[in-house]
Image: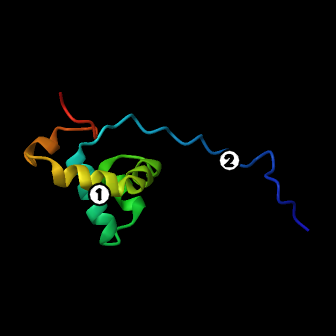
Amino acid sequence: MASKRPGSNSVVCEPKKKCKHMTISVQQKVDLLRKLDKSVLVRTLCQQHNIGSSTIYDIKKQKNHLLKFYSECESKKNMEVHRTLKEGS
C-alpha cells in the first residue's frame, strides 16, 4: 500500500500570494451584489475585480445595510467615489 505522505522528491507548493489591499466604491459593491443575484460565481467576481473571496462574502453580509444606504443617497454619481457607509459631515 502506498503512503499518503509526500516523498522527499515531491514538489512543495509556494504559499498563496496575499491580495493587495483594494478598496472598492459603494457603486462597485452594489454592482457585485447585483451580479451575485444573477448567479455569477464568486470566483469569477474575485478575478474580475481583483479582490478576495472573503471580501465578497463580507459585502454579501452587509447587503441590506448597503442597499439601504445606496437607495437613500441623494447623488448616485457620488457613490462612484464614496467607499464607506458613513455619512459625510
Left or right of 28 in this view: 2? right
How far across and down, in percent of the image, does residue 24 sit? 28, 42
Task: State the CA–CA distance, disc 1 to disc 2.
Answer: 37 Å
Residue sitting nearer the eye, 18 or 34: 34
Residue sitting nearer the eye, 86 or 27: 86
**What residue is pinned by disc 1?**
32
Quadrant in the picture for the N terminus: bottom right
Q: Earlier in the sequence, mark 1 or mark 2?
A: 2
Which amino acid is tagged 2?
A: Val
Residue in view at x 40 percent, y 35 percent: 20
Q: Residue furthest bottom?
A: 38
Left or right of 59 in this view: 15? right
Left or right of 64 in this view: 14? right
Residue sitting nearer the eye, 84 or 10: 84
**What residue is pinned by disc 2?**
11
Left or right of 37 in this view: 17? right
Secondary structure, mark 2, is: loop
For residue 33, what is the image quadrant?
bottom left
How far across and down, in percent of the image, does residue 29 sit? 28, 51
In the figure, 1 relative to 83: above or below? Answer: below
Secondary structure, mark 1, is: helix
Task: Name the colouring of the figure.
Answer: rainbow
How far across and down, in percent of the image, does residue 36 sit? 34, 65
